[in-house]
Amino acid sequence: MRSKFDEEMSLLHRELTRMGALCEEAIALTAKALDGERALAGKVPALESEIDQAERDIETLCLKLLLRQQPVAGDLRQVSAALKMITDLERIGDQASDISDIVCAIEGVSRGIAQRLHAMAQATIHMVTASIDAYVCQDAERAKNVILLDDAIDNAFQEIKIALVERIAQNPELGEYALDQLMIAKYFERIGDHAANVAEWVVFAVIGVHKGEGL
């Protein structure tokens, strides 16, 4: 019975890793689209569909583990955390798709803002990768380090917001264009939040403590 459970847990780890990789790819495509390869934005909706399907598949696997295998406390935390993690990963896919929609609708992004958005994208990719790796390796310290990275993304969003507000004040006719760029930044900021949520559930899976209970 235990060997069967271990096999299915290994499958869960693989499927979570695959879902994380799909999220990373979706974010990376939006970043490249922002850098000028706009046609790549059109590939994101298909990735979003794959992410949605991965969420459903992992949810089914988790429910089977809970109902059939009767996991003990530590295993139960891992499965419960995975159920929470896939919700955030699915939302990351949604927000990457939202960014791609905006990129397709506007005539590029100003260079200074594009560079900052690219940095935000790379940071979120790292957060997703590191949080999934921390889950597979059951490494709470690595997950905690991921959570700390969210502050830098929040700060980057604030800097972009201030820059765009100043631009609108100087050139009111650019208001709609600036707001589109601000929405892209906001979606990246939300992606960072979801990646941090994933890391918080990793900490819970490993040590049984979630945010609000004291890490």
Image (cartoon, rainbow, N blue to C red):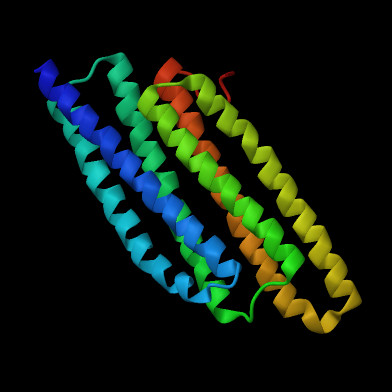
Q: Position of residue 211 (x, y in %)?
A: 55, 27
- Relative horizontal placement of residue 166, taking residue 74 as reference (left or right): right
Q: Position of residue 207 (x, y in %)?
A: 45, 16
Task: Pick the residue in front: 39 or 76.
Answer: 39
Q: Residue at x 48, y 24 (%)?
A: 203
Q: Position of residue 165 (x, y in %)?
A: 83, 66
Residue 209 sits above or below residue 32 on the image: above
Q: Residue 10: which quarter of the image?
A: top left
Residue 134 sits above or below residue 152 on the image: above
Count the numbered circles shown. Answer: 0
- Relative horizontal placement of residue 192, taking residue 46 as reference (left or right): right
Question: Residue lying furthest left in this view?
Answer: 1
Q: Is residue 195 visible?
A: no
Q: Residue at x 34, y 54 (%)?
A: 51
Task: Pick the residue in front: 21 or 144.
Answer: 21
The quarter in which the N terminus is drawn is top left
Question: Residue lying furthest right in this view?
Answer: 170
Residue 74 sits above or below residue 168 on the image: above
Q: Residue at x 63, y 81 (%)?
A: 107
The quarter in which the C terminus is drawn is top right
Q: Position of residue 157 (x, y in %)?
A: 71, 53
Q: Is residue 93 visible?
A: yes
